[in-house]
Image: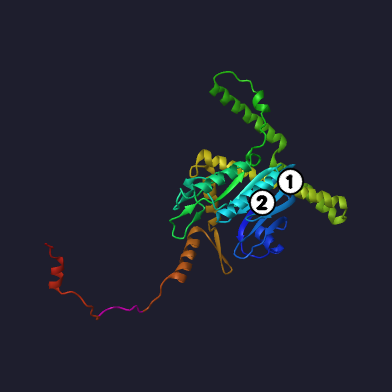
Amino acid sequence: MCACFKKQKKASFEGHLIHNLWGHNDVSWVVKEAVGLLGGMLIIWNTDSFKFLNSFSGDGFLGITVDREGVVLHIVNIYSPCNMAGKKKLWEDLLSFKRQYGSGEWCVGGDFNDVLHSSERIGSSAVSRQGERILFKRFVEEMEVVDVPVLGKKFSWFSADGKSMSRIDRFLLSDGFITTQGISENSWKSFVVHGKKAYVLKEKFKLLKDCLRKWNREVFGILDLIIEKTVKDLNDIEGLLEDDVLESDLIRREGLNNEFWRQLHLKESLLKQKSSIRWVKEGDSNSRYFHQAIKSRRRRNQLVALKYGDQWLQGVDEVKGYVKSYFENNFKERWEGRPNLNGIQFQSLSAEDNLLLLAPFFR
């Protein structure tokens, strides 16, 4: 996991600030400090996500080069200047760095202060910015990256009066960042089904479902039983450590503890996938899961008994009566002598004025 921040006004970042921001201590970061009114930039990542190789920076960007499972990745945080000269220098510096260290995949993201298409800007003359768009597109092509579509709002910047808006924030990725991992086709190609294409596809999906069930059973097994066995092994190790602390037992306990948490994450992921699939198939209000959740909440909120002093109140009528009297005593209004308006004369219209106001109106 990696995150990029920009427009930071702090002159420096201390370790405890980063740890509080990230939520734990297993984190590394690089900083480009703020200079004057120009905000600084920050890149943070989990230390177990990849191996850090080096960092690089220039006017309007901060980047890191990392190694992830043998693949070199360049991650760049962008905060582009607003003027055209500054943008050109930023693009030229990144292209120069790519030519010098060309190997690897690129992820370039942040505030580019520019758009690729006229539809990404409203409230500004499209013709006057056409030259900028051409140069920006040329930069994207030479970097050999693609613009990733975003979800949600179409624009990322809005003027104070709401009349101008642009999509100036974006992520540009090379093919290696968006190309999916290899697909296993062994089972699919092994199926021999004859008939029309629609029938073949349907039957192959049925056969594939059985293969996936078998694979899940062989690789993951029954998670609840595996977790139960891991907990039993942990308890056995804890019992041994009470008598005598051995280095081998400590190492084994640490390994079992890591395995236990890995299994819990697998179970959580599996339950999340199952609930999502069930929601898609059955809808929200008609699903069994929905009704179970409602019943569970109802049971959780149910008042079966109440303790009043040293006495327990049970039964529907007793509990209802106590709850009713409790809220009455706390919220019921007690006002012995309410003020009245008897004898007070208010200004009012006479009967003639009233008839005049109610009379039909003619031009």
- The verdict on residue 339 being magenta is yes
In the image, 60: left or right of 339?
A: right
Tell me the crowding category of disc 1: few under 14, some 14 to 19, or many 20 or more residues within 10 angstroms, Cα based.
some
Tell me: residue 328, above or below residue 112. below
Asked if one can make out residue 326 in the rendered structure from this viewpoint, the answer is yes
At label 1, the amino acid type is Asp
Task: Give coordinates of residue 188: x percent, y percent.
Answer: 64, 26
Quadrant for the C terminus in the image: bottom left
**Distance of label 1 from label 2 (alpha carbons):** 13 Å
Q: Residue 288 location in percent, x, y? A: 53, 42
* Image quadrant in which you'd find residue 328: bottom left
Going by the image, does 295 lie left or right of 19? Answer: left
Q: Secondary structure at mark 1?
A: strand
**Which residue shows up at 82% across the image and 53% down it?**
239
Q: Badge 2 is on which residue?
A: 2
Q: Earlier in the sequence, mark 1 or mark 2?
A: 2
- Inspect the magenta stretch and tell me whether residue 327 lies in it: no
| Residue 171 in the image, given as x and y percentages of width and height | 59, 47
Q: Which residues are magenta?
A: 337-342
Q: Looking at the picture, which amino acid does disc 2 mark?
A: Cys
Where disc 2 sits, the SS reads: strand
Q: Where is residue 147 shown, x and y percent of the image? A: 57, 43
Closest to the observer: 209 or 2?
2
Question: Which label is found at residue 147?
Answer: none
Dot label at residue 67 = 1
Q: Main secondary structure of the magenta part?
A: loop
